[in-house]
């Protein structure tokens, strides 16, 4: 699958300084802190990190789905000159599906078990006051189902009659139903086996190229990212610690966390080490209630310096080849 | 050569067949774990391939529909009380979900003290604590950070390692690990797999590693069994099977693994036929006699309506595919 190349050079999604906090009885928990990135139209970006690193929080914040006690505390997320984070509820309703759409994690739980697939697909369209006749709806449903590789008969079925892969295809059909500028896919294939995973990601890529939309793929499988995205962001403890092109991050990771993450990947063949030479990352992810001072990674970092516990690093350009910048938040640079 | 545990021509069928069709989860499967030569064997397959059914048969949690499960050459059901106790010590398990195996009302100590008490590993409370602390250190956990805590106070990786320690406590001969890292973060996955391998190399424990992830299977195991809808597709030493897969299903599986490498994109031109739910249900009924993979196979032939036997293609390797019938005969 070739990565998409051409497209106008304007960011489809521009996120600046996004902050999300949960206000609990034991204090404020910063689930996302100063998250800044952008995706060009027609491009795909991946966001990786372990559980609790803030990747799903970022996705939910962009969809404005953060629920109390959580709240978006700062930042902007601009699509098409509109800041999603400052819209009122009614305006956000309209922006969903038409500007930004979500392909949720675990399709088995995100479809309504008592509604036919076709009704779930047109639900969103109806909500946006689309003025279609019954015939037009039928045609549209058939078209959408065909696009995601399902037969039109699936429209008359209920979710329990479909396999996991087919359900995930239905959620993709819903997500593209109004031609959004940005599609957020939150671990769309984590519950599927590799063969089905590949087919679904290929379908998603085709549709995105057709729409010219940008994709933000959330996940923890760097292998899948390597097959799919153009640029990659790595999150740790609610912050973005490194961003860059896929090649930069996989070939020359700069942040020690990224380096160790890539080193820990199991692989079928690798020249630089022998089979079974497994390297984990020592220690555990920090609790967001009690983040280490300074750089949150310093207690686990093999390259930690004296300054790391006292100074918090910010994203800096660490590698600038041609037009793509690689940024890392590490005091080594 | 003494065999510790053996599955001899076992099949497992679920469902009564009264109201719905019977589902065959495992067909005529044989496997033996040798006592003298500890190995790591990976059982790999997608959901519904029968890998967890095999684990439950080995552990004696379910009886086979046909065939036998043997412990030291004696069927499980015929074991005497002491033999059964020995079996329970020799064969241990690590489950997939480190969140659900603990009783949330007890501290994790409980899960460790119980086997010590039941197996009579210590004569006093202090001795028990000593044994437990020693075992925790062996899997790389600090007893001070682990003991005295409730399961929810530990991370998923820590909980899974406590389970590894629990299995190790009884000095078993075989550990069945059913998807031990599928619910653990990538950064900890390598550490837990390393723990498992240590059990094999340092303590001489055989491991049956059950997974859907071929890459981790390749990293830690010596032998591999690729399962598809309850039958063996291919079996052999892990390096040749992964590097040069023979069965069309193994080829498809390996071609679909996303490699974390920007220069190694998904193999193009690989024919991918999606499994249809109907076909799966049909091939998994008891009277289906053909090759399980035929409906998705790009090489399907007329003779695939007959189930292929296990053709031996190399000294340590078998493939259940008619494509290899001549090679095996030669």
Image (tube, rainbow, N blue to C red):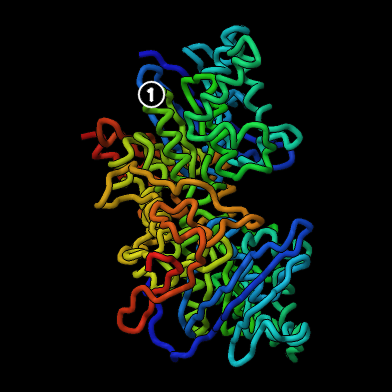
Residue B107 % position (x, y): 70, 32
Element under label 1? loop
Residue B68 visible (yes or no)? no
Name the residue that disc number 1 marks.
B38
Q: Front-most of A114 and B119?
A: B119
Residue beneath the point at 46% across and 57% down: A195
Chain where mark 1 sits:
B
Is residue A168 depicted above or below A231 in this figure?
above
Q: Left or right: B168 with respect to B101?
A: left
Residue A252: which quarter of the image? bottom left
Residue A28 visible (yes or no)? yes
Q: Front-most of B37 and A154?
A: B37
Residue beneath the point at 46% across and 73% down: A315
Residue beneath the point at 66% across and 70% down: A20
Q: Front-most of A259 and B41?
A: A259
Is residue B125 depicted above or below A173 in this figure?
above
Assign the C terminus of chain B to one quadrant of the image: top left
Residue beneath the point at 39% across and 13% down: B2
Q: Residue furthest left?
A: B330
Assign the N terminus of chain B to one quadrant of the image: top left
Number of residue marks: 1
Residue A190 % position (x, y): 55, 57
Residue B160 % position (x, y): 56, 38
Residue B235 % position (x, y): 37, 36
């Amino acid at each position: 699958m070739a990565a998409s190349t051409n497209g106008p050079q304007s960011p489809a999604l521009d996120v600046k300084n996004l902050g999300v906090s949960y206000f609990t009885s034991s204090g404020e928990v910063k689930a996302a802190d100063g998250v800044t990135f952008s995706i060009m139209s027609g491009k795909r970006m991946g966001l990786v990190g372990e559980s609790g690193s803030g990747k799903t929080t970022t996705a939910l914040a962009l969809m404005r789905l953060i629920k109390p006690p959580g709240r978006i505390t700062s930042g902007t997320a601009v699509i098409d000159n509109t800041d999603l984070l400052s819209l009122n509820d009614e305006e956000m309703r309209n922006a969903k599906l038409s500007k930004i759409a979500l392909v949720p994690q675990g399709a088995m739980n995100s479809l309504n078990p008592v509604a036919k697939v076709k009704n779930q697909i047109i639900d969103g369209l109806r909500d946006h006051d689309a003025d279609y006749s019954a015939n037009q709806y039928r045609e549209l449903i058939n078209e959408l189902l065909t696009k995601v590789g399902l037969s039109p008969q699936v429209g008359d079925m209920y979710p329990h009659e479909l396999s996991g892969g087919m359900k995930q295809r239905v959620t993709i059909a819903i997500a593209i139903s109004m031609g959004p500028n940005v599609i957020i896919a939150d671990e769309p294939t984590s519950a599927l086996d590799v063969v089905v995973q590949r087919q679904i990601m290929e379908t998603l890529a085709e549709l995105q190229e057709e729409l010219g939309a940008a994709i933000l793929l959330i996940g923890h499988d760097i292998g899948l990212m390597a097959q799919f995205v153009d640029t990659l962001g790595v999150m740790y403890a609610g912050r973005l610690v490194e961003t860059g092109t896929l090649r930069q991050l996989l070939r020359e990771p700069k942040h020690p966390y990224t380096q160790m993450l890539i080193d820990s990947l199991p692989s079928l063949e690798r020249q630089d080490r022998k089979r079974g030479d497994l390297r984990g990352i020592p220690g555990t992810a920090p609790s967001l209630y009690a983040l280490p001072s300074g750089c949150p990674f310093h207690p686990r970092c093999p390259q930690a310096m004296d300054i790391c516990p006292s100074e918090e690093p910010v994203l800096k350009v660490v590698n600038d080849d041609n037009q793509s910048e690689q940024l890392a938040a590490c005091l080594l640079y | 050569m003494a065999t510790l545990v053996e599955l001899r021509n076992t099949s497992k069928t679920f469902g009564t067949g009264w109201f719905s069709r019977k589902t065959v989860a495992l067909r005529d499967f044989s496997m033996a774990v040798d006592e003298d030569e500890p190995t790591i064997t990976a059982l790999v397959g997608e959901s519904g391939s029968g890998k967890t059914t095999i684990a439950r048969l080995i552990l004696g949690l379910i009886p086979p529909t046909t065939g036998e499960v043997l412990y030291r050459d004696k069927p499980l059901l015929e074991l005497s009380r002491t033999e059964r106790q020995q079996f329970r010590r020799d064969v241990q398990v690590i489950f997939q979900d480190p969140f659900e195996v603990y009783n949330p009302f007890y501290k994790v100590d409980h899960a460790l003290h119980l086997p010590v008490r039941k197996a009579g590993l210590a004569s006093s409370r202090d001795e028990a604590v000593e044994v437990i602390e020693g075992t925790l250190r062996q899997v790389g956990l600090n007893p001070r950070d682990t003991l005295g805590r409730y399961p929810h106070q530990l991370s998923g990786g820590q909980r899974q390692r406590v389970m590894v320690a629990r299995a190790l406590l009884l000095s078993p001969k075989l550990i069945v690990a059913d998807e031990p890292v599928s619910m653990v973060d990538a950064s900890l996955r390598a550490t837990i797999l390393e723990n498992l391998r240590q059990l094999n190399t340092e303590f001489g424990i055989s491991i049956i590693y059950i997974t859907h992830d071929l890459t981790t299977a390749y990293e830690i195991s010596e032998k591999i069994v690729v399962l598809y809808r309850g039958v063996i597709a291919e079996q052999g030493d892990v390096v040749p099977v992964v590097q040069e897969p023979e069965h069309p299903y193994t080829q498809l599986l390996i071609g679909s693994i996303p490699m974390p490498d920007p220069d190694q994109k998904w193999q193009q031109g690989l024919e991918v036929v999606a499994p249809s739910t109907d076909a799966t249900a049909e091939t998994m009924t008891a009277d289906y006699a053909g090759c399980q993979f035929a409906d998705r196979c790009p090489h399907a032939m007329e003779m695939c309506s007959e189930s292929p036997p296990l053709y031996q293609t190399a000294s340590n390797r078998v493939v259940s595919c008619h494509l290899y019938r001549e090679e095996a005969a030669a």
